[in-house]
Image: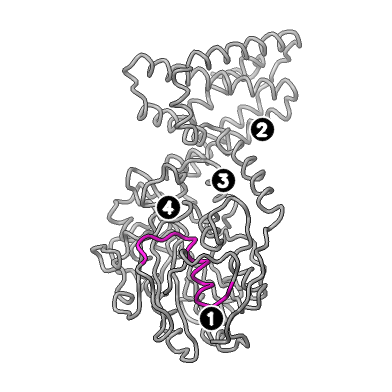
Amino acid sequence: MLKSNLRLTHFVLLMSFLNFLFFHFPFFTFVFDNVDYKSFSGIILIISLIILMLILNAFVFYLIFFASRFVGKFLLILFFLINSIAVYFVNTYSVIIDESMIGNILNTNYEESSSFFSFKLVLYVIILGILPSIYIIKTKILKEPVKRFFTLSSLTLIFIAVLVFANASNWLWIDKNSKRLGGLAMPWSYSVNISLFYIHQYKKNEKEILLPKAIIKDNVKSVVVLVIGESARSQNFSLYGYQKNTNPLLSRTKNLFHFNATSCATYTTAGVKGILEHTNSDDLYEILPNYLYRNNVEVIWRTTNWGEPPVHIEKYQNRDILKKDCKGEGCNYDDVLLTGLKEQILASKKNKIFIVLHTSTSHGPTYSKKYPPRFETFKPVCNSVELGKCSQKELINAYDNTIVYTDYILSNVIDDLKELKEYKSTMIFVSDHGESLGEKNLYMHGIPLSIAPKEQYEIPFIVWVSENSKQLKPNKMLSQNNVFHSVLNFLNVESPVYKEEMNIYK
């Protein structure tokens, strides 16, 4: 039976132990999987990490509670509640709560976040979050003398320093695995990375770096449709040799080309940024739609997704705007992006048109809800948000159906462009990143690129060109940055930042 009256030192040690017990199984699973725990140095490392985690967390809690018991209780309750949600996602989807994953979370919306809701998540929150929070609220914490506080703090810091230096031989291992270890240590995985995310976002958005003026070199009517895919991995496209026929329409389409490609990142915000910028950089350069719009090109952005850099154009159309003129079951899916597309192109008074269709077709975990029922080609499918509960066959079937639907969307874009006889036209399809479907027990995306499996960064890069417009180079391996320069080339826009070697057209 837990006591309701505790000295501060006993209370923070208990909270640190509960935090360790409830939320660090994934952390130490990773350690045991990557350390020779039968060797002497391996045993020392594991014991040191356990002691360090218990002491460090208790010490931080001790400092907070000594400063203010009210603030301490508030933060501790917040930690336990968020920890319970975070460890659910770590256990269920094998994610790492690093800075890029924080970016994913903060850039999501209600529709996406609600798709993760499950009874198991509720149990995690109640058992690991709410019940400890009730105890924290009810516990009376006895005051700590100032002299004892300074003595304990000094001794703890000395002990931590000794323990750290005693593991000097393991520093290289810890440094090598710091991203994964930091992404699994609760509550610091999200609390530290939220701070880092906002610091880096502030730096990026402090001032958009404008690109030098561009010049349109001719009056030939030209249109480029860039379709940004969501979580599409190339290995599940039959165009790339996949055994199941996931591209029944595109495989029969003339003037269609596909290339091997890799993404700049494994999460949407950075992936879309990579597609729209002229170079792969941490700086926030002016993105392609903003640049073309500023230089007198007709630019239209249609989206059922989110996570793009700031778009400064007149015709930005989200799902709600497009649904007003849409009819049929497809309006609840990515079909809505095609509503009146051809008519909007024909209504333009400009000769150069650039259109972005930002899809959400293959985003998990609810793959089976991302396409109309008639596209359920492969069965049975996974209908659970807890992907580990489904067989891999059911999971892959549901995902493959999203690729069949993507095939349909792209084929319809091409059909619309074929009818625009006055225009030279092209469609470029490139995904923001790939997706894990249970391989190596990983799901979805967001693993840091340096350690990500190929499923999360090998992406499709599919190009269609109209008759008598352009031919393509024999491109072997492309990146998302090829898009910027290729669009400039097709529209015959001259720019000082243009790089011919990054252009895919002859």
Front position among marks 3 and 2? 3
Q: Which mark is residue 16?
A: none
Residue 406, located in which quarter of the rendered image? bottom left
Q: Do the residues labelled 3 and 1 touch (CB within 8 Å)?
A: no
Residue 324 or residue 180, whichever sits in front = 180
Q: Tag 4: Cα neighbours inside 10 Å, few (<14), some, or many (≥20)? A: some
Dividing the image into 4 quarters, which one contains the N terminus?
top right
Q: How many marks?
A: 4
- Residue 167 to residue 284: above or below: above
| Residue 241 percent location from the top left of the image | 26, 63
At label 1, which amino acid type do we have? Cys
Q: Mark 2 points at which residue?
A: 75
Residue 16, located in which quarter of the rendered image? top right
- Segment tinted magenta in the rendering: 475-494
Report the Cα–Cα distance between label 3 and label 2: 19 Å
| Residue 180 percent location from the top left of the image | 47, 35
Q: Mark 4 points at which residue?
A: 385
At label 2, which amino acid type do we have? Leu
Q: Mark 1 points at which residue?
A: 326
At label 4, which amino acid type do we have? Val
Q: Tag 3: Cα neighbours inside 10 Å, few (<14), some, or many (≥20)? A: many
Q: Do the residues labelled 4 and 2 touch (CB within 8 Å)?
A: no
- Label 2 element class: helix
What residue appears at the point 65 percent right and 40 percent down from the top-left corner? 195
Report the Cα–Cα distance between label 3 and label 1: 34 Å
Q: Is residue 38 magenta?
A: no
- Residue 486 to residue 236: above or below: below
| Residue 297 percent location from the top left of the image | 62, 78
Q: Does the magenta stretch include residue 478?
A: yes
Report the Cα–Cα distance between label 2 and label 1: 47 Å
Q: Name the residue under label 3.
A: 102
